[in-house]
Image: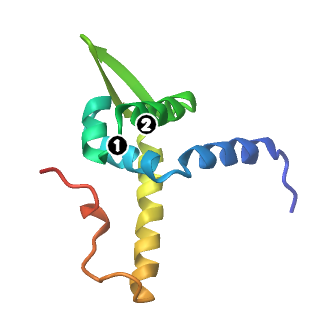
Amino acid sequence: MKVRNLEIFEIHATYCRVLANPQRLAILACLDKRELSVGELAEVLGAPLSTVSRHLSALKDKHLVVARKDGHKVFYSPADQRIVEACALIRRVLLDGMKKRGEIALEIKPDEIIVDD
């Protein structure tokens, strides 16, 4: 067996570093439900606008989210649905493992972590 090109793994690690932040992961999970503005995300996350804006900038720099301007507001959505699906899959694996070990209640469902009011 031989690895032909390590560069793709370097790029992969860079993406993982960007995603290795709980608020950025929560932002992607929220954007999976619908496109949202910075203000809407700040409200949902209970975080300052400047913090959310900084996280969105990091995600946008790595082409993980895209922005759409509508008047004075900018709305964000996932650039590629597969990234959101990959993050959701990892959460499901984590929750399943935690449930098996008795670390969390069995009634927590991965699809109910982010809910619309």
Residue nearer the viewer, 114 or 80:
114
Residue at screen point 47% across, 46% down: 83
Quarter of the figure that contains the N terminus = bottom right
- What whole-number distance in Å separates the C-alpha atoms at marks 1 and 2? 7 Å
Residue 4 lies, in percent from the top left, at 85, 48
The residue shown at (42%, 87%) is 100
What residue is at 38 percent from the left and 44 percent from the top?
Answer: 27
Residue linked to disc 2: 51
User: What amino acid is at disc 2?
Assistant: Thr
Specify the color scheme.
rainbow
Q: In the picture provided, is 114 more to the left or to the right than 63?
A: left
Verify CB contact (< 8 Å) between mark 1 and mark 2: yes
SS label for mark 1: loop
Residue 79 can be seen, yes or no? no
Residue 21, horizontal then vertical, whole percent: 52, 50
The residue beneath circle 1 is: 47
Q: Is residue 53 above or below residue 72?
A: below
